[in-house]
């Protein structure tokens, strides 16, 4: 997607993108500075599995691309950002709407840039919790993102 898209347009496009739309999740908020994204994943006919809880693929798919997309936007075109690995832990069946919040702090961006002054590439790991309205965690996803400067590409 084009770099010039604002948060509102990007959110709208994400929610229409067939790969993301198929998860049943919706991006509900992208902050103007791109440092916070919120996602809503309802339990409905599209997301319900055989036993009546949210399908594991929907849980993972709802959170899969967001840290990578946020870092691409926040670091800019001088960096290459790529998903490297992921793991999901199912803690409780999701039998109601689940929410996830993604945040990237200024200190994290500064640390990435600092590390890439002396290293060719780095891996950063982020944890995302899918929680219900009461704050109970139903699943945790750990995403490992690889980042490098474009001129350091080998």
Image: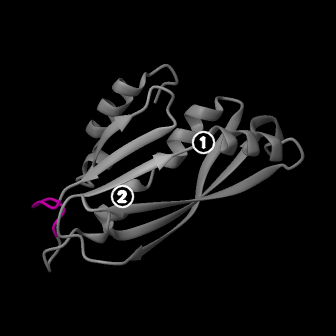
| Picture disc at residue 105 | 1
Q: Residue at x 90, y 46 (%)?
A: 118
Magenta span: helix, strand or loop, mainly?
loop
Q: CA distance from mark 2 to mark 1?
A: 23 Å
Q: Depth-wise, is mark 2 or mark 1 nearer the camera?
A: 1
Residue 60 vs 93, above or below: the answer is above
Q: Is residue 103 left or right of residue 30?
A: right
Residue 20, image x and y in percent?
32, 48
| Picture disc at residue 39 | none
Q: Which residues are magenta?
A: 43-48
Residue 106, image x and y in percent?
65, 37
- Quadrant for residue 112, please give it: top right
Q: Are marks 2 and 1 in contact (CB under 8 Å)?
A: no
Residue 132, image x and y in percent?
26, 62
Q: Which residue is mark 2?
A: 61
Q: Nearer the viewer, residue 108 or 23?
A: 108
Residue 58, image x and y in percent?
29, 62
Q: Residue at x 51, y 28 (%)?
A: 33
Q: Residues within 10 Å of mark 1 (few under 14, many from 20)?
A: few
Reply yes or no: does residue 44 show up in magenta.
yes
Q: Residue at x 82, y 42 (%)?
A: 114
Q: Secondary structure at mark 1?
A: loop
């Amino acid at each position: 997607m084009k770099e010039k898209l604002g948060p509102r347009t990007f959110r709208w496009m994400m929610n229409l993108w067939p790969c993301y739309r198929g998860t049943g999740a919706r991006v509900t908020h992208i902050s103007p500075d791109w440092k916070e994204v919120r996602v809503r994943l309802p339990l409905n006919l599209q997301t319900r599995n055989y036993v009546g809880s949210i399908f594991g693929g929907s849980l993972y798919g709802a959170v899969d691309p967001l840290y990578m997309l946020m870092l691409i936007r926040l670091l800019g075109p001088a960096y290459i950002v790529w998903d490297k690995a992921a793991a999901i832990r199912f803690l409780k069946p999701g039998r109601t709407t689940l929410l996830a919040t993604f945040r990237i702090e200024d200190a994290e961006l500064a640390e990435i840039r600092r590390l890439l002054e002396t290293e060719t590439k780095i891996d950063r790991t982020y944890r995302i919790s899918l929680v219900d309205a009461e704050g109970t965690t139903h699943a945790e996803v750990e995403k490992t993102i690889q980042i490098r400067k474009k001129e350091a590409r080998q």
